[in-house]
Amino acid sequence: MYKDLDPLLHSQLRLAIVSILMTGESADFNQIMDITKATSGNISVQIKKLQDAGYIEVVKSFKNNYQNTALKITNKGIKAFENYVECLKQYIK
């Protein structure tokens, strides 16, 4: 039986952001933009959706006198990503 895929992670950009965060401690906004090649406005919208769902934590600070937005995946986000991957495996079998 096929399980429903998490609609929040089924978006290509949101899935990319969470995938990036799964590989390391954290990433900043510019790293996400460089890797995904998405616009800053689109990334901002997707970050907000992931943050509202509790999948990522957003930490704003200053780095060399410039505003820095750092992203970190939460335990809830890790579980959601792992569940999403398991559901995908059901479709692949």
Image (spheres, rainbow, N blue to C red):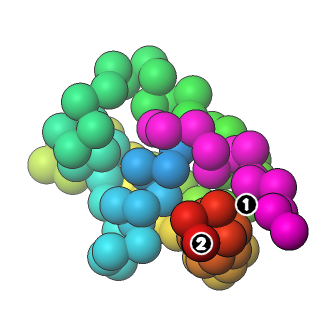
- List x then y, in percent, for residue 32: 30, 45
Tell me the quarter of the image containing the N terminus.
bottom right
45 lies left or right of 68:
right
Range of residues picked out in magenta: 1-13
- As drawn, the label of residue 93 is 2
On the image, which quarter does residue 35 sit in?
top left
Q: Which residue is mark 1?
A: 54
91 lies left or right of 31:
right
- Whether residue 68 is visible here, answered yes or no, is no
- List x then y, in percent, for residue 56: 59, 60
On the image, which quarter does residue 4 sit in?
bottom right
Q: Main SS type for the magenta part? A: loop
Q: Give the distance between the C-alpha atoms of the residues marked 2 and 1, in whole angstroms.
A: 30 Å
Q: Amino acid at mark 1?
A: Gly
Residue toward you, 3 or 28? 3
**N-term mark: 2 or 1:** 1
Please say whether residue 8 is one of the residues in the magenta stretch: yes
Residue at image x 28%, y 38%? 36
Residue toward you, 23 or 11? 11
Mark 2 Cα-neighbour bin, 10 Å: few <14, some 14–19, many ≥20 = few
- List x then y, in percent, for residue 31: 22, 48
Query: Of helix, strand and loop, which one carries label 1?
Result: loop
77 lies left or right of 20:
right
82 w.r.t. 6: above or below? below
Q: Amino acid at mark 2?
A: Lys
Q: Residue furthest front?
A: 93
- Whether residue 3 is visible here, answered yes or no, is yes
